[in-house]
Image (cartoon, rainbow, N blue to C red):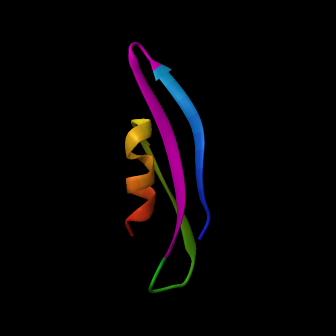
Amino acid sequence: MAKKSVASLQTGSKRLTKAIKMVKSPNTGAYTFVESVMSPEKVNEWLAKK
């Protein structure tokens, strides 16, 4: 499963990061991409959970 932090986004005084991970579907076996924008401190926690 590939994991990658893609971009750092800056909006006002908040610093945000967009993270993308590949998730394999248990039914079809196909991969989908899940994207989320969050603070940089939460990226590793988000990538670690399934």
Residue found 37% across the figure and 65% down from its top = 49
Is 23 situated above or below 43? below
- Residue 30 screen position, x and y as percent: 57, 78
Residue placed most toward the observer, 12 or 48: 48
**Quadrant in the picture for residue 45:** bottom left
Residue 19 among magenta residues: yes
- Residue 36 screen position, x and y as percent: 43, 46
The magenta segment is 11-24
Q: Quadrant of the C terminus?
A: bottom left
> Left or right: 5 with respect to 12?
right
Q: Quadrant of the N terminus?
A: bottom right
Is 6 situated above or below 13? below
Residue found 40% across the figure and 40% down from its top = 41
- Residue 21 screen position, x and y as percent: 53, 59
Residue placed most toward the observer, 35 or 45: 45
Q: How many marks?
A: 0
Magenta segment's dominant SS is: strand
- Residue 19 screen position, x and y as percent: 51, 47
Residue found 45% across the figure and 86% down from its top = 27
Residue placed most toward the observer, 32 or 40: 40
Is 3 situated above or below 16? below
Is 10 situated above or below 35? above
Residue that sits furthest to the top in the current view:
12
Residue placed most toward the observer, 17 or 32: 17
Residue found 49% across the figure and 36% down from its top = 17
